[in-house]
Amino acid sequence: MNPVLVLRWLVIALVFCSPVAFTQDLGCSAEVELDGGIVKVQSTADGDDTDNIQCALDAAVSGGYKDVYLTSDAYSIAGVTANDYEGRLRGRSFDLTTINVIDGSLDCTTGAALRFIVGDAVVTRMKLTINEPCSTPGGSASVIGFYSNPENCSGDRVVFGVVDRIIIEGGGSSALDFTTGITMDAAPACFPETGEALPEANKALGSLIINRNQIRDLDIGILSSISANGQVDITFNNPMERLGIPISIVDASQATNIYRNQIYYNDVQYPGDLAGLFGTTGVLVGNSSASPAINKTSFSKNKFIDGGVHSEGYGLLSAQQGKSIIHEMIITSNTFTGSDANSAGSGLAVLDTSNGVISANTFSGSAATWVSLDSGDIADGGLGSTVSGWAILANSFAASTATTDITLGASTEDNVVGKSQGQPVVDDAGSNDVLESAASSSSYLQNSPIRVGSESLYQRQLETILGRSAPLRKLGR
């Protein structure tokens, strides 16, 4: 073979395989380059990296690349969207890579600063900060949003999302904009006009994994609303603190596994119309008239810590309004640490929901009551249903200083409180099998119904979430 011809083809191959050639093919600025199969992005000197990160994601989608890597220390963005991206957006670590959402830069009707429309995306190894992102003050936005396709709401709604090893920090309770850390839901454009329920055919499908993150100083930490038995795993997030509501599950039909998280609740004071409303509750599971018929939630080996800021606080508050659904709940092997200041709240308050298990949990310190089962008050939007089929077994109340450890409301029946739980104080106003209590059976409450204060709080929290977050109903704060 002619050696000159061989050399010519070698030169041509080197040119087309060089980073410079591939950078030109991406159609991005000089800060974006292709290194092998990795799209690398450096920060710009002008302080706005939106266009470069957007171009990198677009190039990754069109070129089939699976890795967009942020190589610099700090970035600032307005809002970027990845349509049908299957790959990672990663930094070096949450100590070495920070993305700040620029104040006043975001069109908050689009939902989030980092928007992933369908696809299979992973966000990992970075720190994300947000304060007042909305171009219209008092708007609502998420930092990371996984959404269905707003151009085909009922036909293209499968999305898979992973958020792993990141820090998300907000502006705290005094910020004007309503901010959520991570959202998986239908795209905001798929919701009907204000006041109308989202059709179940428009709800998002898929799965969400949130693992080993730190989330703080936001209105909502995690919000998910997936249909058709989607899978949500919230694991090893430590800490989740100073959040209006750390975890909120709204109108979902999803198998939610909440495992080994450290969840602070009742640990922040809100001003204005959210005073005493947000900052009180660790996990809210909300079902309205728009909810699918079946939901599943499992809590295991989490640490719930009561900050004692309000006299009424809840580690877990779950209820139903407008529609009775089957909600399968398992609450096992968690630890709850109370506060003397919480004189009206509960560690676990579950309303209008039957057939669950509360087992092997440890309750220490004070609360008004650690476990509360009851029907929802109809005057506050509850169903007023009979609550039955709960097993409260093998828990430890030995370190409890609560006024009442277990409260069974007047509309409860055929629930079981087992033996060997450290002699809990049980108030049974219903018709249940209480096998052990620090009080004798003759002192059980068998008279007036127990009015659970959590119903009114739950109703207002649910309405606020439906109206203001993500933004689910396109309302401002």
Image: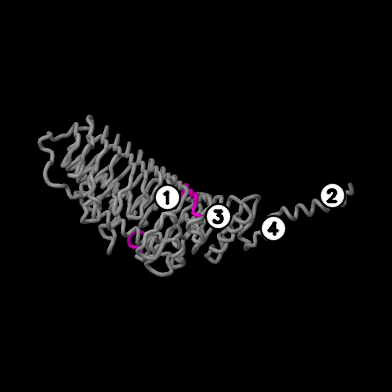
- Checking the image for residue 84, the label placed there is 3
Q: Which of marks 3 and 1 is nearer the N terminus?
A: 3
Q: Earlier in the sequence, mark 3 or mark 2?
A: 2
Q: Do the CB atoms of the residues marked 1 and 4 lie less than 8 Å apart? A: no
Q: Do the CB atoms of the residues marked 3 and 2 lie less than 8 Å apart? A: no
Given the image, on which type of amino acid does mark 2 rest? Answer: Val
Q: Nearer the viewer, mark 3 or mark 2?
A: 3
Q: Earlier in the sequence, mark 2 or mark 4?
A: 2
Q: Which of marks 1 and 2 is in front?
A: 1
Q: Nearer the viewer, mark 4 or mark 3?
A: 3
**Which residues lie in the magenta part?**
156-175
Given the image, on which type of amino acid does mark 4 rest? Answer: Val
Crowdedness of circle 2 by 10 Å Cα count: few (<14), some, many (20+)? few
Quarter location, residue 257: top left
Numbered circles on residues, count: 4
Instruction: Indicate the secondary structure of the residue bearing disc 3.
Output: loop
Q: Do the CB atoms of the residues marked 2 and 4 lie less than 8 Å apart? A: no
Q: Mark 1 points at which residue?
A: 227
